[in-house]
Image (cartoon, helix red, strand yellow):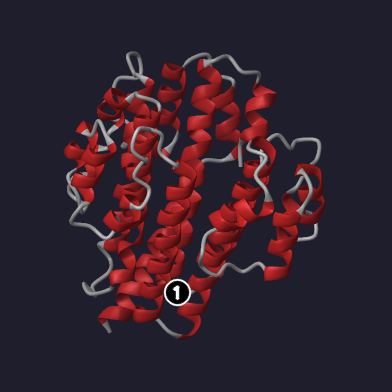
Amino acid sequence: MLDSLSNKAILTKARAMYGKRLTSEDYNEMMRMQSVNDITAYLKNETWYGDVLAPISESTAHRGQVENLIRRSVIERYTKLLRYDFSKGNSFYSYLIIRSEIILVLSCMRMLNSHSSDEFIITLPTYMIRYASFDLMGLAKARSYDDLLRVVEHTEYYDIIKAYRPKKGSEYIDLIGCESALMTYYYQKVYALIKKDYGGDTRKQLEDLFGSEIDIRNVSLIYRLKRYYRYKPDQIRALLIKAPGKMTARLLTELVDAANPKAFIAVLKRTPFGRFYDGERFTHIENVTDKTSYHTNAKLLRFTIEAPVALAAYMNCIDLEVENIFCIIEGVRYQVPVEEIDRLLV
C-alpha cells in the first residue's frame, strides 16, 4: 500500500512540477531583456523561480549568484520529489547524485588543465556538500592531479581517475578520455541499479530512457571529435560510452566511419535524431541532441505510469530548461542578437 501511495505521489508531483515549466513566451521575454538584472527580475516576478531567487535582489544580482541558485533548485526539486518515496532502500534514486559528483570531478579537471583552479571555489555548489561522497572543499582546494586523487581515494571513482594521471613531466589531463571512462562507469552503475530494483515495464522504460541518453552523448561526441579534433574512426570508437544504447551497432558504426561532418549529418538524418535536424537553424550538434532529449523525456513524462521513470524524465527536462536560462543570460550579457540566442534554445 505504501509503495502504491509513494509511486502515485511522485508521479503526480513530477507532472505538476513539469506543468510549471517555462514557456516559449517566457524565453522570448527574457531574450529581449537588457541585462542579467532584468532577467532575474522577470524570473522572480513572473515565473515559479521566484522562491528560488528570493535570497538575492534583482537590482544587484550577479550572474554567478543567479546560476548557482538555479542549479541548487534542481537538486532541491529532486529531493522534494523523493519526500514522497516511502521505500528507503530504493537505491536507484542515487543516480542523480552520482552524475552530479562526476560533473564536479570533471569541472575540477578542466580548471587544472586551464590553470584556473582558484576560480573553482567561486562556482562550487555548496548545496552538494550534504550529498557528495567526497570532500567538496577538498576538491575546490585541489591544485594538482595528485590532490584530486587524494580527495576521491575512498570512492569508486578513484581507480578510473588514477588511470588518467598525467605522465611524468606533463600536467595535461586527457579530459576526453577520462570523461568517457567516468560516464561509462555511470551508465553501467545506473543499469545495475535498475536491474537490482526493478522489473517489467519499469525496467524496460528506464533502460530505454538511459539508452537514449547514451545515444545522445555518443552522437554529440562523434560529431565534435570529427569536426573539431579530426579524430580517426578507431580513436573515436575507443572513446564511446561502453554501455548499451538504443541505436543499432550498424548505425553507430556508420556515424563513426563517416568521412567528414557533412557525411555524418547525412547518416544522422536516417536515425531518430533526423526529425530534429533543421539545416537552416543548425549551428551546433546540441541543436539536434538537446531537442531529441527533450522530446523523448517529455513524451515519457506524459505517458508513463511508473514513478521512477517520471522522476528521471522530469529531471532531464528541467536540466534542459536550466541550460536554456543560462544560454539566455550569457547571450544578453554579451549582447548577442535575439535570433542567434533563439537558435541555441531547446
**Res 283 seen here:** yes
Residue at the image point whose x is 36% and y is 30% from the top: 111
Q: Amino acid at mark 1?
A: Glu
Residue at the image point whose x is 59% and y is 55% from the top: 218
**Residue under pointer 1:** 306
* Mark 1 surroundings: few (<14), some (14-19) or many (≥20) residues within 10 A: some
Which quadrant of the figure contains the C terminus? top right
When asked about the image quadrant of residue 27, the answer is top right
* Spot occupied by residue 219 in the image (x, y as percentages of width and height): 64, 53
Left or right: 345 with respect to 103?
right
* Spot occupied by residue 306 in the image (x, y as percentages of width and height): 45, 74
Which quadrant of the figure contains the N terminus? bottom left
* Spot occupied by residue 341 in the image (x, y as percentages of width and height): 62, 27
* Spot occupied by residue 109 in the image (x, y as percentages of width and height): 36, 38
Query: Eyeballing the image, is 68 above or below 36?
Result: below
When asked about the image quadrant of residue 2, the answer is bottom left
Number of callouts in the render? 1
Left or right: 6 with respect to 207?
left
Q: Nearer the viewer, residue 129 or 186?
A: 186
Residue at the image point whose x is 67% and y is 69% from the top: 249
Residue at the image point whose x is 34% and y is 23% from the top: 116
Query: Eyeballing the image, is 121 above or below 149?
Result: above
Secondary structure beneath dot 1 equals loop
Query: Eyeballing the image, is 268 above or below 12?
Result: above
**Res 20 seen here:** no
